[in-house]
Amino acid sequence: MEKPQNNSPILIVDDDEGLLFSIRAALLSAGLPDPTMVSDSRQVLELVSRNNYHLALLDLIMPHLDGMEVLKQIKQQSPATECIILTAVDDVGTAVQAIRFGAYDYLVKPLQVKRTTIAVRHALERYQLRQGMALFERPQSFSDLKHSEAFQEMVAEDES
């Protein structure tokens, strides 16, 4: 089951379709973007390659590819995408492993709506902050400007 939302920054992957719709309803009621929903973990990498997801919410235990494997593959293919693991497995070792593989957060089911929406908001904010910082990390030149001619008359001096 896939609900294509090519412009959505959020992807939810869970084999429980009822939970997909519950999470979607919680996100929408909190004013968050309508997510893309996928129940088959084998579809995730193709979706990630075609779309710029800011955040992926991943069930840990799924048929085919488990959430930890999907997490590793997403981080390899799209390192900027934030990921949150959703699971009924309340185990510190598994949570630590998920964080080491690049997960932003680890939420234990049954999900609390407020906690989930706060985690999603924070992950999306982190994504935006990292994207903004990346703009300052790359060297800038006049060729990057849309209207570089506006600076032709400017004279500057580097004191270094």
Image (spheres, rainbow, N blue to C red):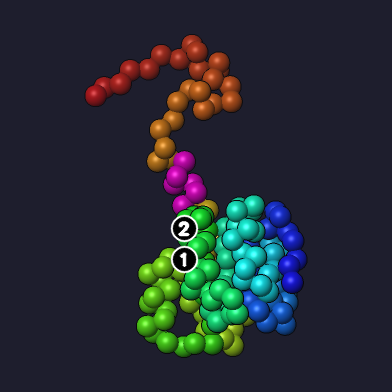
Give the x, y percent position of residue 69: 49, 71
User: What residue type is disc 1 on?
Assistant: Lys
Give the x, y percent position of residue 43: 65, 65
Towards the viewer: 65 or 150: 65
Which residue shows up at 50% across the image and 13% down it? 152
Q: Are marks 2 and 1 in contact (CB under 8 Å)?
A: yes
**Residue 118 in which image quadrant:** bottom right
| Label 1 Cα neighbours within 10 Å, binned few <14 / some 14-19 / many ≥20 | some
Magenta span contains residue 115: no
Can you name the residue that lies furthest to the front here? 64
Towards the viewer: 149 or 86: 86
Disc 2 from disc 1: Cα separation? 6 Å
Mark 2, secondary structure of its residue:
helix
Give the x, y percent position of residue 119: 53, 71
Towards the viewer: 84 or 156: 84
Q: Which residues are magenta?
A: 130-135
Which secondary structure is most common in the magenta stretch? helix
Q: Quadrant of the C terminus?
A: top left
User: What residue type is disc 2 on?
Assistant: Gln
Count the marks: how many?
2
Tell me, yes or no, if residue 99 can be seen here: yes
Which residue shows up at 50% across the image and 49% down it? 131
Tell me, yes or no, if residue 22 can be seen here: no
Towards the viewer: 39 or 119: 39
Direction from residue 132 to residue 17 in the image, left or right: right
Find disc 1 in the rendering and name its residue.
72
Mark 1, secondary structure of its residue:
helix
Q: Quadrant of the N terminus?
A: bottom right
Which residue shows up at 38% across the image and 77% down it? 96
Find disc 2 in the rendering and name its residue.
76
Q: Is residue 126 above or below residue 66?
A: above
